Amino acid sequence: MNINRKFLIPLLAVLCLAVGYASATIIAAVTQPKTNIFERTKNECPGVKWDSGVDSSNAVSPIKIEGDLYFAGERVPLEDPEVKERLERELQINTYWHSNTLLCLKSANRYFDAIEKILADNGVPDDFKYLAVIESNLRNDVSPAGAVGFWQFMKGSAKIYGLEVTDEVDERYDFEKSTTAACKLLKESKAKFGTWAMACAAYNMGPGGLEEHVKQQKENNYYNMYLNSETSRYVFRILALKVIFSNPAKAGFSIKPEELYQPFKYKTVEVDGPIASIADFAAKYSLKYKHIKLLNPWLRSYQLVNAAKKHYQIKILEQN
């Protein structure tokens, strides 16, 4: 085939562009950008100055913090020496509790995107993502008292706030649905007690217990109240993580983006009837039983009887 020379160069240019575009598309598909939540959290404490106590000699020194710090948009009175001391205590613990804090940093990268969206959709401040961290370390743990999941709901309160809890379905283990339930509880407490810090305290000790303290102490400012050890530490544990997540390297945590746990990739399948065997259900999608359970821990049995024929969304892991 003869090609006129005056068309040859433009033709080659078009071919090169086409090949380049195809290559770029393939590379982009293979090397999808990784989630790195620390690109966002690094801006969460702009008015704070702190000395983490970590230096090149590995000598341990006390953590010092000053400046303007906010919880859920509410200023923390660090000028009060007792308040400052409570924060420094939690910073010290979480900075040097290396194994636990490191795992929280890695796990948060997997779950924070979804949690942040649910909080925003429900009008709850972003800082409450750290409440899930201090409650459960972002694991579906069960407490000695029987509280379950990321947000540590007891069975009774879970049902009040819209979560199904049966022998075969326990939505306390669904971190997205339990986040929505936690939003309802927190907003209710905020309306009752007036501030997000007090809503936090109510989440920990129960609204009834907190209401009695308010009555007896004639005080409704969390930072001015004398509460039990766990509740008096509660907001400060959240604040300590907020400060550390804003600058993990300053606290001595060196994590490469590729070392962070990435969100699971999945599609959803709706079922409105029984599943005789979850293992067989998984096999239909070339998956194993554990792949279904990892993304759907709210399925509490080897089957789903679903006598009421409810509609459930089951996440199906997409494997690379």
Image (spheres, rainbow, N blue to C red):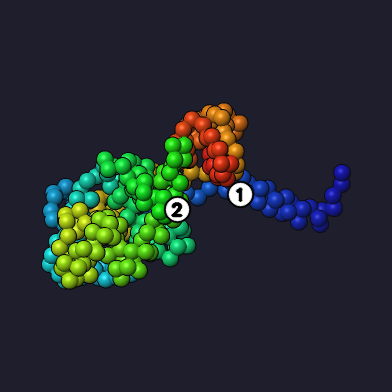
Q: Is residue 276 visible?
A: yes
**Residue type at tag 2:** Gly
- The image quadrant that residue 282 belongs to is top right
**Residue type at tag 1:** Ala
Q: Which mark is residue 289?
A: none
Query: Which residue appears at 33% of the width and 64% of the height?
Result: 189
Query: Which residue appears at 84% of the width and 49% of the height?
Result: 3
First in sequence: mark 1 vs mark 2: 1
Residue 304 drawn above or below residue 184: above
Nearest the eye: 276 or 14: 276
Query: Which residue appears at 13% of the width and 53% of the height?
Result: 61
Query: Badges 1 and 2: C-beta atoms under 8 Å apart?
Result: no
Outermost residue to the front: 308
Query: Which residue appears at 17% of the width and 71% of the height?
Result: 218
- The image quadrant that residue 198 belongs to is bottom left
Q: Position of residue 131 (x, y in %)?
A: 32, 55
Q: Position of residue 88 (x, y in %)?
A: 17, 59
Residue with the mark numbered 1: 24
Left or right side of 167 for 230: left
Outermost residue to the right: 1
Nearest the eye: 250 or 187: 187
Residue with the mark numbered 2: 162
